[in-house]
Amino acid sequence: MTSDTAIAKAFSPVIIPAKIRTLFDDLSFAHIAAAHISEATGIPVTIDDVVTQDMLDKVTVLSVLSGAPGKFTSLRGIGHLRNLQNVMIENQPVTRLPEDFGTLAKLTSAHFINSALKSIPDWIGNLTSLTQLNLSSQRPLGIMRGSIPESIGNLTRLERFDLGNNNNLCGKLPDSMARLTALKNLLIQSNGFEDMTVLNAMPSTTNINFHNQALGIFDLGKVRQNNSLTIRLPEIFVQAQTPDDKLYEPSGVQIVGAPGTHLDPNRHDVHLPTGTTGTFEVMLAIHGRLTNVNYRYAVIE
């Protein structure tokens, strides 16, 4: 099933004209939509009023800022506002972007700040008119997980992309990001990305904040005394030790804990000591607040 087919299946439009309350799953969001329809048309309406598609099409901006009355958890039905160009939603407990959000072909700016989004949908690449996409600082901290989908490379008009301060976004930055040639600002700080090689293929004019990639603690279990314990380093550590890489940090890797831990000359591996029994934890970090990772293990006889 293609992403377009999935969207069509998930979004079965109500026959319009229809009452506003029937167009949206969440009643609180229906009230907000009614207020925006009233403002756009100059005709006062409530959720119990019938609206035409022409009235819905007049809404080009949807703005719900911090402190706005009412909380909503679902945006489903937003696809009825098919001429939306700008969406700004702050401090709302919305956990997912509904599939019909992906039908907003005229959308140029989407900001979801301090919301509760759990992931970035694969169909995000359908929004090819986007110039700004802000999914930063979802709450509670760490609720947004997973990786950036390859389809992000379809957003070739994107100028600003902000995923900062989400803590648990991880994996490899998709190679398709090299197609984002219009990108001026990329903010991916304070996450857990372990492979950012694509940054070397991005325009030199792109301003990038990539610091504070905390990769977490890896429990390696038990190992016999004096047995070899060699761990492949995350790619971000290799990048940081490679001259001419965008992440290059000349001060190198800092090792804390377990004396005897050392890097292989190839810079791809770390050798952990096993000569003494006990429980150990080793932290590897790159100066300049780029990244860190911890390895925990036990040496037994």
Image: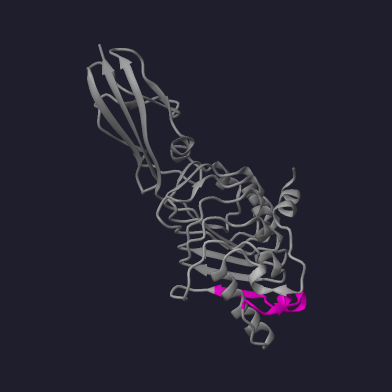
Give the camera-side residue of 83 and 258.
Answer: 83
Give the camera-side residue of 286 and 204.
Answer: 286
- Report which quarter residue 18 is drawn in: bottom right
- In the picture, measured across the screen, residue 85 lies left or right of residue 221, that is right
Asked if 64 appears above or below 196 in the picture, the reply is below
- In the picture, measured across the screen, residue 116 lies left or right of residue 12, that is left
| Residue 57 placement (x, y as % from top left) | 73, 75
Quadrant of image for the C terminus: top left
Give the camera-side residue of 19 and 66.
Answer: 19
Decide if residue 77 is in sight here: yes
- In the picture, measured across the screen, residue 293 lies left or right of residue 118, that is left
Residue 190 belongs to the span the image colors magenta: no
| Residue 204 placement (x, y as % from top left) | 57, 54
- In the picture, measured across the screen, residue 67 lies left or right of residue 296, that is right
Asked if 3 appears above or below 194 in the picture, the reply is below
Quadrant of image for the N terminus: top right
- Report which quarter residue 114 is drawn in: bottom left
Please name the residue shown 76% across and 74% down the image: 17
Asked if 184 appears above or below 60 in the picture, the reply is above
Decide if residue 179 is in sight here: no
Which residues make up the magenta segment?
47-63
| Residue 104 placement (x, y as % from top left) | 70, 64
Residue 57 belongs to the span the image colors magenta: yes
| Residue 176 placement (x, y as % from top left) | 65, 46
